[in-house]
Image (cartoon, rainbow, N blue to C red):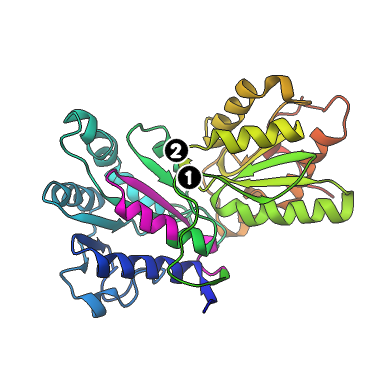
């Protein structure tokens, strides 16, 4: 029987089921044992399975990832947690130089079936180093899968798939969604890696997003329909690598207009890649240029300014309006991320 399940509980269930079903799965990281992690994603795992299956590590991210690499070579499937997204930067060299390249370096003889979990993005009133959106670094690194679920069902299903994968997975969890709920009957299986989800059908504009901005995209589409009679199709990418060109391009060819929404900074980010792919593949179907809505090109601000930094419904609607009803959209004022919000 289905019951209300939070995003965090879905992740916890996925870890618990994976540990129970596969003796090679190990969970470790900073404070994930007795405490159950800062966000309690690993709550109860040490008590149920013992310290040999879920345990704490020293505060040394490079060492944590290096240790996981060694465990993979001995037949284990480590699932490690970076306490906050930006805390993973000390381990970046290990991820880029070794985790991502091992299969290629050994001509397929050695794979690294590991998952690195990153609580990421803002919306929780956190301070610098606690709210980064660093997906751009990882999608730019060949050899990694990059996953960012937006629903409890996807959180469970995609984490199970990530743990079972023979290749390394960067699993990015939007912190602002940990307390979101849905009716779930666990275990559940959603679409696999590489398949986007059309969260809302529409005919006027395609709004492409992922992770923490999916709820904002859906809210904007709801307001657009109610107040402006705009029909907005919302696509949740779910996985950034592999990328679902088929679903995205089919939608854009149908609507003729596209807005890309991402919480990360706009310059040279994932949103720019998506916009470029759409422009290359759908040029003759576009009635207007592809526009982007993003965070600002600044370091993450103090909590009191967070609302001004983050994309939101007003900024999304402003951008859709520029595409949808202007015969000649005003594109002279820079990225949508820099525009003032609706009055």
Which label sits on residue 308? none
Q: Residues within 10 Å of mark 1 (few under 14, many from 20)?
A: many
Spot occupied by residue 225 in the image (x, y as percentages of width and height): 83, 52
Residue depicted at 82% across the width and 50% down the height: 224
Q: How far is the residue under mark 2 from the one under mark 1?
A: 6 Å
Spot occupied by residue 68 in the image (x, y as percentages of width and height): 20, 51
Residue depicted at 31% across the width and 75% down the height: 35
Total labels: the figure holds 2
Residue 5 horizontal side relative to residue 108, left or right: right
Say if the magenta span includes residue 165: yes
Q: Which residue is mark 2?
A: 242
Mark 1, secondary structure of its residue? strand
State the extent of the magenta-drawn residues as a range. Answer: 157-180
Looking at the image, which is closer to me, 228 or 302? 228
Residue 332 horizontal side relative to residue 141, left or right: right
Is residue 149 visible to the viewer in this orientation of the structure? yes
Looking at the image, which is closer to me, 23 or 260? 23
234 above or below 325?
Answer: below
Toward the left, the furthest residue is 74
Residue depicted at 25% across the width and 80% down the height: 47
């Amino acid at each position: 029987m289905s019951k209300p399940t939070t995003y965090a509980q879905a992740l916890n269930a996925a870890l618990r089921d994976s540990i129970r079903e596969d003796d090679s799965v190990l969970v470790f990281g900073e404070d994930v044992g007795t405490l159950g992690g800062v966000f309690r994603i690993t709550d109860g795992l040490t008590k149920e399975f013992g310290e040999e299956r879920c345990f704490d590590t020293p505060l040394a991210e490079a060492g944590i990832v290096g240790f996981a690499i060694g465990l993979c070579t001995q037949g284990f499937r480590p699932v490690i947690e970076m306490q906050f997204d930006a805390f993973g930067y000390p381990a970046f060299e290990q991820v880029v130089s070794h985790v991502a390249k091992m299969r290629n370096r050994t001509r397929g003889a050695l794979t690294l079936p590991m998952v690195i979990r990153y609580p990421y993005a803002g919306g929780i009133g956190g301070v610098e180093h606690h709210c980064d959106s660093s997906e751009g670094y990882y999608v730019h690194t060949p050899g990694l899968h990059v996953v960012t679920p937006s629903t409890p069902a996807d959180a469970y299903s995609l984490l199970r798939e990530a743990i079972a994968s023979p290749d390394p997975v960067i699993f990015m969890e939007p912190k602002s969604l940990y307390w979101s709920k849905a009716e779930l009957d666990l275990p559940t299986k959603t679409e696999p890696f590489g398949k986007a989800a059309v969260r809302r059908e529409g005919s006027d504009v395609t709004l492409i997003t992922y992770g923490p901005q999916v709820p904002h995209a859906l809210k904007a589409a709801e307001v657009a329909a109610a107040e402006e009679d705009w029909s907005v199709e919302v696509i949740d990418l779910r996985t950034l690598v592999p990328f679902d060109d088929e679903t995205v391009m089919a939608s854009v060819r149908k609507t003729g207009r596209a807005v890309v929404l991402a919480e990360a900074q706009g310059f040279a980010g994932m949103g720019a890649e998506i916009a470029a792919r759409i422009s290359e593949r759908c040029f003759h179907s576009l009635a207007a240029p592809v526009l982007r809505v993003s965070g600002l090109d600044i370091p993450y601000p103090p909590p009191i300014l967070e609302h001004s930094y983050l994309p939101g419904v007003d900024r999304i609607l402003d951008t859709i309006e520029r595409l949808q009803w202007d015969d000649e959209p005003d594109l002279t004022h820079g990225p949508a991320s820099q525009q003032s919000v609706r009055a």
